[in-house]
Image (cartoon, rainbow, N blue to C red):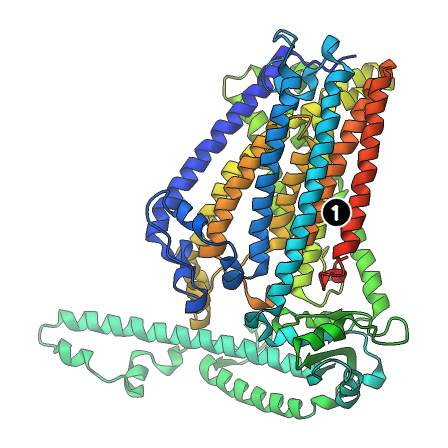
Amino acid sequence: MTSVPSDAATRASSKSFVTALVTSTALLAVEFGAFVIMKRKMGRIYSPRTYLPPPDKRANVLPSGPFKWIPGMLREPLDDVIHKNGLDAYLYLRYIRMMFFTFFVFSVFTALVIVPVYTVGIPDPVGINGLERITWVHLAGEYDTPERFSAHVAVAYLLTFFVIWLIRREMLHFVHKRHEFLGSREYSRLAQARTVLITNVPDELANEHELRQFASFVPGGVDRTWIYRDTKALNDVFEQRQQACENLESAEVNYLNMILKAWKRRLKLRKKDEEADTKETEQLPPTQELIDELVPRLQRPTHRTGMLGLFGAKVDSIDWYKVEIAQMNEKINDAREHIVKGKFLGSAFIRCNLQLGAHVLAQCVSYHEPNKMYSKYMEVNPKDIVWANLDDGVLEMRFRCVMSWLASAGTYFKQSRYVTSLFIGSLSNVNEVCLEFRWLQWICDAPDPIPGFIQGVLPPALLAIMFAILPFILKANNISSWYECIPRYSLMQISVYRRFFLFLIFHGFIVVTLSSGIVGTIQEIIERPADTVQSLAQQLPTASNFFLTYMITQGLAGAGMALIQLFPLILHFFGKWFMGRTPRQAYTVTFQMPAVKFGLLLPRLSLLAVIGFAYSVISPLINILAMLTYATYYVAWRFLLTQVFDQPDEVETAGLYFPMAMSNLFVGLYVEQVSLGALFLLKASGVKTQFIIEAVAMLVLIIITIIAHVSIHRSYHRKCQGLQYWR
């Protein structure tokens, strides 16, 4: 049984690819044109780093012109990003650049070896045209020989060794850069560089004297200690005061607006009176009598003191909140004097005099009893702490971790998600659906470019929408690392990275691949159930058509959408109306620059790498598209991370995302090797010993890759202090 698709299906696949290419190119042209126009007129959105940060962290002004800014930006040293935006941003850009170089090498190797295998000596009229001309399915019939497929084995070995070498080189560079960054004068001067958070501290160490004596062995000694105690009453009063301050600010702003409107109405009436002395009126001093005359006290902002502001006595908001804030200040001062009497909650912060001392303290075995002083966290910033997660014991943390991952797994396997992914995969192979189910023939018979749009543009767009919605679903369902009791927001993002990547692999690759391949085998499965596995395996390479269009969509339209910054653009025009009514809100909207959540960005790029690796030999065209994708992403994010985004010090992980991204590359290698090995075994069903030898060669390559993976992990995870927190 061969895997030669029909001419109609093949033409439809090529048509959908061309439609996706044209559509994505058009979207990129529109997005880039809009970006060039708005970039010159809206510096607050597209170049805020040139004037908002401190002078030493400001970005250089790029050359004007539609395209001159690109070479001007690329000529700047990439290391400048470390000083201006942190090591996370630098390693994110380096990862994109590395993947561009990787797929450039992949493109060269496959073009020189695999493409000739698919084309040389094979005449065109073999039942296949279009994209399938340079894919695995082209080698059918008399051309389905072990000699031709031996090239796949050789290229797989070469590409695997190249990726392993590249991963090792990049990990070595990461370790050097991380140590340089942590030891730099700019970072080491921060208090967080010398602060260690220790959880599950025993009660006998719950005082400053005992903690100092315990940490007396560290080089340089201890500067200060903080013991985390039960301050719930103080926290409640503090939060109430914060809310009262915001309410007072809002009431005063409303009051000022009322005064301004009344003053404008008075001026308007005065101007109508020819005998009025307008100039003298404009120079009246803003006395309290004038203000009370413009807005009587009975018209000042008011509210009710009861529940939800719907019940209780009606009071003057400004006067009432002033009294409330004064009373809360007294309560806070009184509570602070008695804070040492609060119950010890098991955590302590120790700030060392030297950064070396903090690292020694964080890596030592601290206590002789199990589950005591179990976790220690470096580079601790107060704004990065999840205070509600500090009072949980080791057993509770482990239980919550298990339950959190079970909840995440339940989300991954929900039937609605599976059906969504299956529907997306089926759409990507709609031409086969038309052949198997005649009642859907109207889709394929529709005039161009409707069939190509349905098959080439709609599936990647639906998949991108599903991936964009997932982080909000995880947050809404509490399937997140918050429940896992992780005590730092930055480390929560690392946990989110792991969950998001697993979801993308399962739904964005495995399920879509199976659903794309299974459509073409439905009829055969119904007629010959015993041949289900063989039919499915032979159809799997045709799923590459969907991922070709997905690469185009992400590389062109996706990069353009990232560059245009749609959400900040909308926020710029409408944010002050809805979120800029008070001075604090106006300051945030006007002067605060956006930040990047790498835990949501890197998994998407890692998925593209896995897809590219998986189909690099089966469908070589994907290597060129992946190279184009990472090139456009590099230009877009190089601009954004140097001109637009600003990473706060408290969310900086010093590159802890990077080793995870490197480890994810092995997933792509495993998928590629397992797929090739399985396809060789299925071809060996015709009792061809050469195919069995090629399958065994892939098994050996899998073992080599596993050994390299384990070796790299053991070699570097102890050198990258902090990786044990997400391992």
> What's the amino acid at mark 1?
Thr
Measured from the top left, where is residue 552 in percent x and y? 55, 33
Camera-side residue of 620 and 550: 620
Q: Quadrant of the C terminus?
A: bottom right
Q: Quadrant of residue 666?
A: top right
Camera-side residue of 299 and 206: 206
Q: Residue at x 49, y 85 (%)?
A: 322
Residue 336 visible in rendering: yes
Q: Circle 1 is placed at which residue position? A: 411
Measured from the top left, where is residue 455 in percent x and y? 59, 25
Q: Is residue 494 left or right of residue 451?
A: right
Q: Is residue 386 left or right of residue 69?
A: right
Q: Quadrant of residue 104?
A: top right
Q: Is residue 135 left or right of residue 697?
A: left
Q: Residue at x 77, y 30 (%)?
A: 675
Q: Secondary structure at mark 1?
A: helix
Q: Residue furthest left?
A: 275
Q: Residue at x 81, y 52 (%)?
A: 406
Measured from the top left, where is residue 584 in percent x and y? 46, 71
